[in-house]
Image: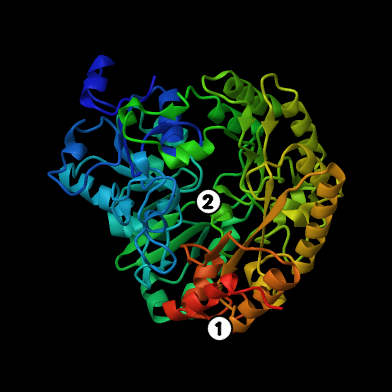
């Protein structure tokens, strides 16, 4: 049964009101790949009555915000699976004409800065009902951040929205803890402030009593000084990449203090399995029938996520800041059970589009000495070189692939997620993927060719991609397959000049004879190293001054090098 979305659905269940009402900027798809569904099912598993209001109309008389009345405990608010500004605008700040998380792919069903808009409306209508915010938009804006779309520093989303509590990162532990704390009907901030992986605003008296705290530069100091903003980021990134963080981050904004409690340690496989095994309908809500396909659902409905987290630490990526650096892998049983369920479902054609994760081949990888991982402060296990403590064996993943291939009614299971070729521990993995798990195109992300730019991106040398290209062609030739290697590249990254893009064009279009299609202009997103370098024009770790293509004309010229005629 889907979580209720209307008053009639509540009445059919015999509910006078819901305990928690979730507002989301996405269409409601009851599947573990969509955050609101996961949060709803986690709360339900704690015995709470949960309702969902997907894509409420914020422009009219606000009836979508009042149709279910007030919840007994609190409202939950999320922008959806994407930051609403990334969802709305291209890198050159043009409004997108579609939305992959809306029925029919239609645009215009969520506002800019959706978390703030929804929260302010709810606070206006129900001033005494608490609001808990979460999801990618809230999580990565929990402290002072650079906002590319307004070209300014903005304070914590807690300050801008007026929310009572922010649950950052993934919620499999935090959401049940919040539910248990408020189950008796008392939204006790004194108790909620003790939880891990939450953030809130407090006064000076409260902050003075925090013992293990790190005081960041205030929002006002960051506005005056790029150095202060950069120093804050270094501390935030370091803390977010610790296995067992203990310090509380405190940042003053005006007469308020934003308090960010330390994150939980990585989930166990059992905990992750439990979240994937909740009673999802694994389909869009029936309310969308006749309104067209939801592109994001069509893309993932036959895919299986096998792990959480990424230790690559790429400068432009938000995965480690939101999901964490350390890998939590689902058990083989959990993955195979999901695949077998999928294989028995109506309309299944025998093909899985992706067996992957943030990086498809990090499954089962971890530090050999966990105590060394607890002390580690590196933002990446792969840059500037692979950590000697990393167990990068692909044996566990290859064993899983073999068991997946044996599932009845399954014709092929493809790898659609990107693969980290700097993790390969020998030729066997690439050969297996090419032979059994490639749909004709294998995705990888070298991102650039020039060493200085790659260092700033925290990516491996381009020579490793060239070696992969040779090995891929040899594997295809041995198997008699006419497959393509699809590389992803980025232009306008801080430190990248037009001359660097010219060199990229000559190497990739010329010498290697690629026709590029998976390319993008950098969008500096909150809480990434790239966004800090874009704002300040410096590397926050070294203080080195960098060229930054800020003007749209400069960004367009850099991107144009992807599409030049192939040089002789």
The x and y percentages for residue 424 are 80, 51
Q: Secondary structure at mark 1?
A: loop
The x and y percentages for residue 145 are 43, 66
Residue 165 vs 144, above or below: the answer is above
Displayed quadrant of residue 403: top right
Residue 473 vs 297, above or below: the answer is below
Displayed quadrant of residue 29: top left
Q: Residue at x 30, y 41 (%)?
A: 55
The residue lying toward the viewer, choosing from 375 and 332, is 332
Q: Secondary structure at mark 2?
A: helix
Asked whether the viewer can see residue 194, the reply is: yes
- Residue 322 image label: 2
Left or right for 441, reference 132: right
The residue lying toward the viewer, choosing from 125 and 27, is 27
Mark 1: give few (<14), some (14-19) or many (20+) Cα within 10 Å: some
Q: Residue at x 70, y 52 (%)?
A: 484
Earlier residue among tags 1 and 2: 2
Task: Say which quadrant the C terminus sits in.
Answer: bottom right
Instruction: Measure the C-alpha gap from mark 1 to mark 2.
Output: 28 Å
**Residue to which mark 1 is pinned:** 547
Task: Say which quadrant the N terminus sits in.
Answer: top left
The x and y percentages for residue 108 are 28, 50
Left or right for 321, reference 507: left
The residue lying toward the viewer, choosing from 97 and 57, is 97
The residue lying toward the viewer, choosing from 294 and 251, is 294
- Residue 497 image label: none
Residue 171 vs 146, above or below: the answer is above
In the displayed image of the protein, which residue is found farthest to the left? 61
The x and y percentages for residue 506 are 69, 76
Asked whether the viewer can see residue 209, the reply is: no
């Amino acid at each position: 049964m889907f979580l209720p979305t209307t008053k009639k659905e509540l009445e059919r269940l015999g509910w006078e009101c819901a305990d928690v009402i979730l507002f989301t900027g996405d269409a409601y798809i009851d599947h573990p790949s969509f955050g609101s569904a996961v949060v709803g099912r986690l709360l339900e598993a704690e015995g709470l009555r949960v309702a969902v209001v997907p894509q409420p109309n914020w422009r009219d008389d606000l009836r979508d915000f009042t149709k279910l009345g007030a919840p007994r405990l609190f409202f939950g608010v999320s922008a959806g699976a994407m930051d609403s500004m990334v969802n709305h605008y291209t890198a050159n700040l043009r409004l997108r004409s579609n939305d992959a998380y809306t029925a029919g792919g239609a645009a215009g069903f969520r506002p800019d800065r959706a978390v703030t808009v929804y929260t302010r409306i709810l606070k206006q209508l129900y001033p005494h009902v608490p609001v808990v915010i979460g999801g990618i938009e809230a999580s990565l804006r929990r402290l002072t951040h650079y906002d590319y779309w307004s070209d300014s520093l903005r304070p914590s989303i807690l300050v801008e929205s007026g929310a009572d509590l922010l649950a950052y990162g993934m919620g499999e532990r935090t959401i049940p803890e919040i539910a248990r704390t408020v189950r008796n009907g008392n939204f006790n901030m004194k108790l909620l402030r003790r939880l891990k992986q939450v953030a809130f605003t407090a006064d000076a008296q409260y902050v003075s009593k925090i013992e293990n705290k790190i005081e960041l530069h205030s929002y006002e100091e960051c506005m005056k000084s790029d150095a202060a903003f950069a120093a804050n980021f270094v501390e935030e990134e370091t803390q977010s990449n610790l296995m067992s963080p203990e310090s509380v981050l405190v940042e003053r904004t005006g007469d308020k203090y934003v308090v960010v409690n330390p994150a939980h340690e990585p989930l166990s496989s059992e905990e992750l399995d439990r979240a994937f095994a909740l009673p999802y309908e694994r389909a869009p809500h029936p309310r969308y029938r006749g309104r067209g396909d939801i592109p994001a659902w069509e893309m993932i409905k036959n895919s299986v996520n096998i792990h959480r987290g990424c230790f690559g630490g790429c400068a432009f990526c938000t995965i480690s800041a939101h999901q964490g650096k350390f890998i939590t892998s689902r058990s083989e049983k959990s993955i195979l059970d999901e695949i077998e369920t999928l294989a028995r479902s109506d309309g299944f054609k025998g093909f899985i589009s992706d067996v992957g994760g943030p990086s498809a081949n990090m499954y089962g990888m971890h530090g050999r000495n966990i105590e060394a991982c607890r002390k580690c402060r590196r933002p990446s296990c792969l840059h500037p070189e692979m950590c000697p403590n990393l167990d990068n064996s692909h044996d566990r993943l290859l064993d899983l692939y073999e068991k997946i291939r044996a599932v009845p009614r399954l014709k092929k299971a493809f790898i659609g997620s990107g693969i980290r070729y700097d993790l390969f521990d020998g030729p066997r993995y690439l050969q297996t993927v090419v032979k059994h798990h490639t749909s004709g195109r294998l995705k990888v992300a070298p991102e650039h060719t020039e060493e200085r730019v790659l260092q700033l991106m925290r990516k491996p040398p381009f020579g490793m991609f060239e070696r992969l290209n040779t090995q891929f062609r040899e594997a295809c030739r041995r198997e008699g397959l006419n497959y393509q290697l699809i590389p992803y590249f980025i232009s306008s990254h801080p430190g990248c000049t037009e001359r660097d893009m010219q060199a990229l064009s000559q190497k990739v279009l010329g010498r290697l004879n690629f026709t590029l299609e998976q390319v993008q202009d950098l969008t500096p997103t909150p809480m990434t190293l790239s966004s800090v370098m874009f704002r300040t024009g410096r590397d926050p770790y070294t203080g080195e001054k960098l060229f930054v293509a800020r003007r749209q004309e400069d960004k367009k010229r850099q991107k144009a090098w992807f599409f030049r005629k192939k040089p002789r």
